[in-house]
Image: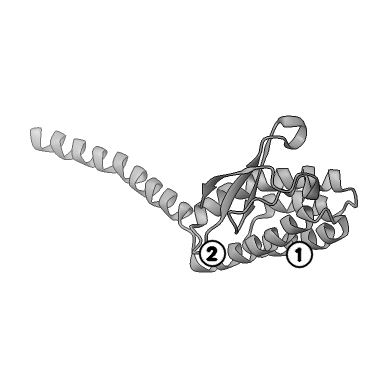
Amino acid sequence: MKTILTLALAATLLACSSPKQESSTAEATAETVTVEQKADLSASVDAYMSLKDAFVATDAAKAKDAAATLSTELKKAGFESLVASSDKIAGSEDIKVQRAAFYELTTAFIPEVKKAELTSKVYVQYCPMAFDNTGANWLSKSSEIRNPYFGDMMLKCGKVEEEI
């Protein structure tokens, strides 16, 4: 009788522990970024940098074109949730509307870039004065500050917050 109870208890414990092991394996797999995804994300980062540079130059037309390219790259990389903000930029000619959408895009994009562990350095930069002193981040491949939220009005306003 003790043997039967011991076997039943062992079987129950084994059955209960198996889903947890599968779950943590699935979670680890979900967090792993493939080589192809890194390449797609790298292309998205390059397109993002072109967009950022258009904002630094305060060029709404160039930002519109760069955002359209970024939308294409984000779709290829599977970042559909980021496409709406990029499309909002591509659909506007108002630099203020575009910059607000750029802020939304950047806020969602930074965690994805961190997760990917790219081979090239990317800097998270911050301007405390953007959007009526609420502040905003952006990404750059250079540690030199070139503020996309103010362009030449306050080109060097900001600081490097983090290196990814």
Q: Tag 1: Cα neighbours inside 10 Å, few (<14), some, or many (≥20)?
A: some
Across and down, in percent, residue 149 comes to 76, 45
Q: Which residue in the protein does label 1 denote?
A: 69
Q: Is residue 75 left or right of residue 68?
A: left
Q: Tag 2: residue type? A: Lys
x and y, in percent, of residue 101 in the image: 77, 45
Q: Which residue is mark 2?
A: 38
Q: Choose top left, top right, bottom left or bottom right for residue 7.
A: top left
Q: Position of residue 146 (x, y in %)?
A: 69, 52
* Crowding at mark 2 (Cα within 10 Å: few <14, some 14-19, many 20+): some
- Would residue 90 be found to the left or right of residue 2 on screen? right
Secondary structure category for the residue under label 2: helix
Q: Quadrant of residue 79?
A: bottom right
Residue with the most extreme right position: 93
Q: Residue at x 81, y 52 (%)?
A: 89
Can residue 1 be seen from the camera position used here? no
Spot the residue most to the left.
Answer: 2
Q: Secondary structure at mark 1?
A: helix
Direction from residue 146 to residue 89 in the image, left or right? right
Q: Is residue 101 visible?
A: yes
User: Residue 62, position in %: x, y?
Assistant: 83, 61
